[in-house]
Image (cartoon, grey):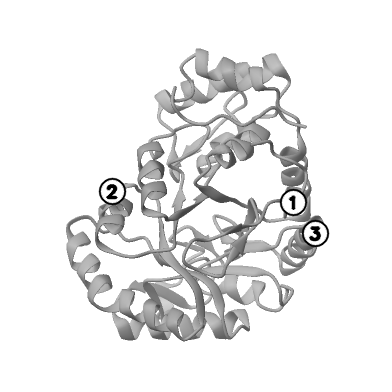
Amino acid sequence: MAVTASLSDRPTRLIGSDVHLPPFGFGAAPLGNLYRAVADTQVQGALAAAQQAGFSYFDTAPHYGFGLSENRLGPALRADAVVSSKVGRLLVPISAAERAEVRQGFADTPDLKPVFDYTYEAVMASFASSCERLRRERIDIVYAHDLGALTHGPDDEFYWQQFVEGGYRALQTLKAAGRIGAIGLGVNETAVCERALNELTLDVLLLAGRYTLLEQSAAPLLDKCAAAGVSVVVGGPFNSGILARGVMGEGPHYYNYEPAPESVIARVRAIEVVCAEFAVPLSAAALQFPAAHPQVVSVIAGLASAAEVASAKRWLAHAIPAAFWQRLRERGLLDPDVPLPAAGC
């Protein structure tokens, strides 16, 4: 599948829904002041540039800046933009003693904190609050956010049952009423996705960081999604930034939101060597690779400025020869069975 400069080329309809997604989308976690505060003027510039560049799908969540990302998106988006958000956390007030410059990875946030709750009532309340912040009566896709053992550890089964017995029914009710176009999970791990395929009826999975240029551990899951008729949106194509900045310069280098282990740094360095051989920007390869899988309907990358939007568009348009992908495979840097992008145009 050749990647072109058009961000809206080949819109794909999610199975079981009326939602059409472009092949690439805008991740709005950075607009919630992820790791650092972002000025309102910079946010406005990023969103204006994104829509001018052709971005039409925007992904957010109440967790991103504790409502800040949704509040910033709401007034800035055109009415025809496709929007996804998430449920599973309620935002509740904090005391003065709980204030901090950075909380849960977000800087300079409102005096709110997220509390996990996947019950029917909580999901309904979370959806209503998201609609208010986004200034929309309908949200195109709603994902149940961060289910699974990776997030919840020993409480995993408790929250899974809470969702299955409550929140999932709420999402089905909202979809039947036309308030939601599609429902799914938004997670960073494959095990809970496999469980969901076995136990639930979903339209789409948003999987972050597990099917990327750096790692393709989710390849078997994507095959199962194809068999089940469930679409896949790939998030985190830069694996927390290590595939955006590379490792040839000074660190720190982050992977999975933490300092990268040496094994990951060595693998990225080896990928960068191949990139240098073919004069391919690492970020261009990282963005284009996941889109080659036929089950992937969209790839979303976090962007925080007009300059980052311009860079993303340039990377998406960069022509990458087929020999580049083959060289990565020959050197054991890509799974031997995953689909490779066609030669760039």
Horizontally, residue 250 falls left or right of residue 216, namely right
The mark nearer the N terminus, 3 or 2, is 3
* Quadrant including the C terminus: top right
Task: Tell me the SS state at disc 3.
Answer: helix
Alpha carbon distance from label 1 to label 2 = 33 Å
Which circle marks residue 191 in the picture?
A: 2
The residue labelled by disc 1 is 309
The quarter in which the N terminus is drawn is top right
Q: Which secondary structure lies at badge 2? A: helix
Q: Secondary structure at mark 1?
A: helix
Q: Specify the amino acid type for callout 1.
A: Val
Mark 1 Cα shell of 10 Å, populated few (<14), some (14-19), many (≥20): many
Disc 3: which residue: 49
Quarter holding residue 245: top right
Circle 3/circle 1 CB separation < 8 Å = yes
The residue sitting at 36% across, 60% down in the picture is: 146
**Depth-wise, is mark 3 or mark 2 nearer the camera?**
2
